[in-house]
């Protein structure tokens, strides 16, 4: 395993912090343009290792733009917080790094607060690519190791799906 320089680890960690902040602050234009390559694939998996299905959407996205568009709508009803842990990095090429980040997230209804919420965590498994001096996500796979959702959160997902909101 080839370790990365502290500068590379810091640059990728900064981008990962922006990934979480842009999602939580609903800056979807920056999430789309500044974090991942245009061809980056994003896959979000549940505790069973399979892609999560929310409503009719299987959470597999073929670009940051598609991911930002869908989650922009989904998160518009929620207050969110994503905490990202320190990264574990492996240099696989001069311009590519594999990274693993632990995370915890919380999602709560804007109107019902903790009555309708989800809390979970797990790991992001990613490949980062250096392009023109900046690091970008080339591919991302989130795998949950635990998840706890309130009954009202689950009911809200079903209702939103039936109404065509997600």
Image: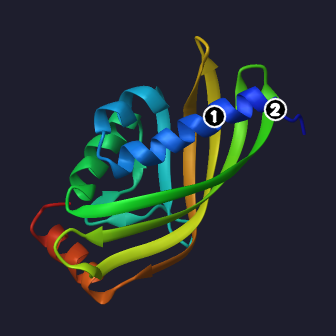
- x then y, percent, for residue 7: 74, 27
**Residue at image x 33%, y 34%?**
65
The quarter of the rendered structure image containing the C terminus is bottom left
Which residue is outermost to the bottom?
151
Give the numbered dot on residue 12.
1
The quarter of the rendered structure image containing the N terminus is top right
Which residue is outermost to the top?
132
- x then y, percent, for residue 85: 64, 55
**Residue at image x 26%, y 66%?**
55
Give the numbered dot on residue 4.
2
Sequence-wise, the earlier of marks 1 and 2 is 2
- x then y, percent, for residue 15: 55, 35
Secondary structure under tag 1 reads: helix
Secondary structure under tag 2 reads: loop
**Residue at image x 21%, y 52%?**
73
User: How are the colours assigned in the image?
Assistant: rainbow
Q: With 20 as the anchor, is 67 left or right in this view?
A: left
The image quadrant that residue 90 belongs to is top right
User: Mark 2 packing: few (<14 Cα in 10 Å), some, or many (20+)?
Assistant: some
The image quadrant that residue 137 belongs to is top right
In the rendered image, the vertical position of residue 122 relative to residue 72, given as above or below: below
Tell me if label 1 and label 2 are in contact, CB under 8 Å: yes
Q: With 40 as the anchor, is 98 left or right in this view?
A: right
Determine the CA span between mark 1 and mark 2: 10 Å
């Amino acid at each position: 395993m080839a370790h990365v320089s502290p500068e590379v680890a810091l640059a990728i960690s900064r981008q990962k912090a922006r990934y979480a902040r842009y999602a939580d602050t609903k800056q979807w234009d920056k999430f789309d343009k500044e974090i991942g390559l245009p061809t980056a694939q994003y896959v979000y998996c549940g505790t069973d290792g399979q892609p999560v299905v929310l409503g009719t959407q299987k959470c597999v996205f073929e670009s940051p733009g598609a991911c930002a568009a869908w989650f922009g709508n989904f998160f518009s009803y929620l207050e969110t917080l994503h905490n990202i842990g320190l990264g574990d990095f492996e240099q696989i090429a001069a311009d590519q790094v594999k990274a693993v980040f632990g995370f915890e997230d919380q999602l709560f209804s804007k109107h019902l607060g903790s009555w309708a919420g989800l809390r979970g965590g797990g790991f992001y498994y990613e490949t980062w690519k250096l392009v023109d001096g900046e690091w970008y996500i080339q591919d991302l796979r989130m795998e949950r190791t635990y998840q706890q959702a309130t009954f009202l959160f689950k009911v809200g997902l079903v209702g939103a799906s039936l109404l065509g909101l997600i």
